[in-house]
Image (cartoon, coloured by chain):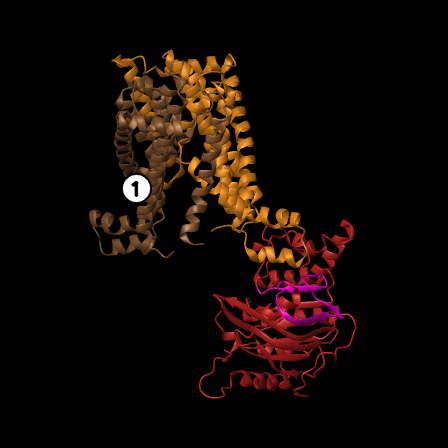
Amino acid sequence: MNVSTRVEAAGEARSGPGALTISGLSRTFRIDGRELPVLQGIDLSVRPGEFVSIVGPSGCGKSTLLRLIAGLDTDFSGEIRLDGKRITGTGLERGLVFQDHRLFPWMTLEENVGLALLNGTLDQARRKAVVEDHLALVNLTGFEKAYPHQLSGGMAQRAAIARALVTEPTLLLLDEPLGALDALTRVHVQRELQRIWMQQGSTMIMVTHDVEEAVYLGDRVVIMDARPGRIRRIVDVDLPHPRKRSLPQLHRLRDQILDELTRTPEGPSENLVPFPSREAR
Amino acid sequence: MRPIDRPAVRIIAALLAPVAVLIWWQAQSAAGGARALAFVPLQDVGASLVEMAASGLLAADTLATVSRAVTGLLFGSMAGILVGAAMAMSPIVDRIVGPLYHSVRQVPLLGWLPLIGLWLGNGDGAKLLIVGLAAFYPTVLGSYEGLRQVERRYLEVGVLLGFTPLQHFTKVLLPGGLPLILTGIAQAIAFAWIATIGTEILLGAGAGLGATMSHAQAQQRMDVILVAIVATGLLGFTLNHLFARLRQHLLRWQAAIA
Amino acid sequence: MTRASSLIAGVGPLLLILLLWQWASASGLFPPQVLVAPADVAATLADLIARGELGVHLATSLKRLIAGFLAGAALGLAFGTGLALSRTFEALFAPMFQALRQVPVLAFLPMLVLLLGIEEGFKIVVVAIAAFFPVALAAFDGVRGLPRSYLEVARLYRTPLVPLLGRILLPATIPPILTGLRLGLTRAWLVLVACELLAADSGVGQMMEMGRQMFRIDVVLAGVLVSGLVGFTLDRGVKLIERRQLRWKAA
């Protein structure tokens, strides 16, 4: 197992569907006249089909980073390129799964999942088939006519993942997708996520508080610092998929990263990362 | 189960007070006091009911009142949704129309009658205008608040999925705002019904339950008045009840509140 | 927005309408029965105040309102509380209450005229009825909504009736009851004006009806303004009390 600290420089990215290049990305918020730098000088290259986890303490800007890549936020300096093209605003080739599933409560599951296809070119029959395929992908066949309030948290989140995948995006972004689920459901959905990723082959970038989840799912783990948000280092997780949770290498890696995140240079640190599964939100 | 909770007991208990009132009423009519004319014997009321139903007067009045109420309701609530939506979507419209709306709303609805009477006379136009206004006020408020409180996080999903502005409105704002919009319409129905009866009583002319009541009062026919009152209550209840069922169906996606 | 600019934003549109109105009536496009300049309305209003006429009308209306409202609200509070506290009382009177509630108060006007004539008593009774229903409903909701735990604590300490009402029931139910009182007050005002339009010899409503019969639109508009102001003051007044009472509640 390699724990290398390579930081991929911009420009090294290979081309191919789903290659993401971020160069010199900075984002500053203006609050009450003061400037708050949330992200500073982010350089990151993601290979096509890669699964990248991002961990870091609260306030390190990881969610902001995802929103910038998704195009929900467009006020930044620097460059974000997907397969060579600059990103300006949202696009169906980039899907985003939120922590709160954000299924529309007034629509059935199949209506929700089919939302992204509305402005596409498929006819109704094809749309229905695609929706069914993706519901099957997340193991929710049979719940097409259910309303979100009738689903459990885990089921709703899986539906949200299906909704994001229905356009076959080249890049799927996940913002703490399992943070609102209880521990047991989380384990289950993590396994589903791994299976889906292996089946689909999209590039996936996942932000999470849970270091264990990050090393379990990710090919690489990006460790961020806070205030301002920067990439501290990137860790390779050189293990084949599908992985078993019990692998000792995973545990060692997790402990190392946790230790790094909670280690203080001098005195109590603001970078304290509480133990993920115990964190109160 | 305590005796008071048994269904049979509850039914009997429910009937006790009304029956007592009826008995008191009948006694008053037999006593022949100063207002004997007012305390019409119950059998006369029953006879009037039969007569009014048979002659078609009841049906005609019901039709006139209900159609007046529904017409005013439709126009008033549609206008209300448009204005409320405009205010919710555009801060400029909100700032201009808002104060106007709130100040005009302070005037008791029927207080507009003399003014509208001067402009439009006694006819249907005046009545419909007031009924429409009665429906307008709560619908504006309901639409405004309903659309405004649609959470940003759902709108963001729309942005993410590339919705057109129309899709933003029809797929996110409107359904998300529907609960409060429907509450506004429920109130509009209630107020429109009240306004319909009120204007019919105050403006006398034409057909309708309120007009009949007004004429009956002039002719001191309490029996006709009572029949009309019961009809008014039943119709109002039915209208509100039907809408409540419709509302429940439209909002079936809401989580049941235990 | 600063307070000054938001005040301007609030009043601005109204001033604009006022100016438009003044211009429209001065332009002579509309006959005097239809439109009368705001300046004329103001003059009429000033005249009515000076001659004391407005004062008399207003005082009469307000007297009826207060008398009727106090009676109706007191009865409503008692009735609603009784409904909420006693299953027997509820079984006996709730059905009739719900049935009567379906009838618009105004529909009772002809009946009450026949029963009571058109004297002061009639108007006060009508106002009382108009205030009764919303207040009774609010009292019922407020007391019913009381967390069971409050009442259980009271029973545990065997609290007698008066302290139970005063120290537990009242503070907890004041917010919804205040709202009910506000609704009852505004509805009572509405019904009173309608009543005075129909059958009265004095009062704000009657003043408007007189104005209509004499084709004096300026008098009518003055009445509209006054009735609106009264409605606004009543509504705002109770809202202020509500806000002060709500201080102990989390926002």
| Nearest to the observer: residue A9 or residue C199 | A9
| Residue A125 in the image, given as x and y percentages of width and height | 77, 50
Judge whether A142 appears above or below C115 on screen.
below
Q: Magenta residues?
A: A72-99
Residue shown at 45%/38% (left/top)? Answer: C14
Residue A78 lies within the magenta run: yes
Q: In this rendering, would C228 be left or right of A79?
A: left
Q: Amino acid at mark 1?
A: Thr
Q: How many marks?
A: 1
| Nearest to the observer: residue C151 or residue A218 | A218
- Residue B168 can be seen in this image: yes
Chain letter of the residue carrying label 1 = C
Q: Secondary structure at mark 1?
A: helix
Judge whether A173 appears above or below B181 on screen.
below
The residue lying furthest to the front in this view is C27
| Residue A280 in the image, given as x and y percentages of width and height | 48, 71
The image quarter containing residue A215 is: bottom right
| Nearest to the observer: residue B78 or residue B89 | B89
Colour assignment, chain C:
brown
Q: Which chain is orange?
A: B
Residue A91 lies within the magenta run: yes
- Residue C125 can be seen in this image: no
Quarter holding the N terminus of chain B? top left
| Residue A11 in the image, given as x and y percentages of width and height | 74, 78
The image quarter containing residue C119 is: top left
Judge whether B167 appears above or below C192 on screen.
below
Colour assignment, chain A:
red
| Residue A269 in the image, given as x and y percentages of width and height | 47, 82
List the residue tagged with mark 1: C81
